[in-house]
Image: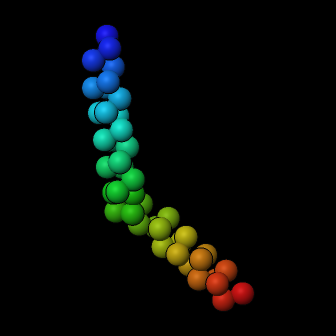
Amino acid sequence: MGPLMIILVIFIFAIGVQVINDWDSLFPQSKTQSKNKDLKSIRK
């Protein structure tokens, strides 16, 4: 069970990293909205 669990954890971690890297391409609307919010807060 030990080695199998380690492989499973690495596999899940790799998927998580890929999802984070592809987040802006998967959800372009949320990224643009957060950018607009940042610009508004900076102007204030």
Q: Residue furthest top?
A: 1
Picture mark count? 0
Q: Position of residue 17 (x, y in %)?
A: 35, 48
Residue in front for this viewpoint, 3 or 40: 3
Q: Residue furthest bottom?
A: 43
Q: Position of residue 19 (x, y in %)?
A: 36, 49
Residue drawn at (47%, 68%), measured in percent from left and top? 31
Q: Residue furthest front?
A: 2
Quarter assignment of residue 21: bottom left
The N terminus is located in which quarter?
A: top left
> From what the image shows, is residue 24 above or below residue 15?
below
The C terminus is located in which quarter?
A: bottom right
Residue drawn at (34%, 62%), measured in percent from left and top? 25
Relative to residue 28, is residue 41 drawn left or right?
right
Relative to residue 44, is residue 11 drawn left or right?
left
Q: Position of residue 39 (x, y in %)?
A: 59, 83
Residue drawn at (41%, 66%), measured in percent from left and top? 28
Residue in front for this viewpoint, 26 or 11: 11
> From what the image shows, is residue 23 above or below residue 16?
below
The image's colouring method is rainbow
Quarter assignment of residue 26: bottom left
> From what the image shows, is residue 3 above or below residue 35?
above
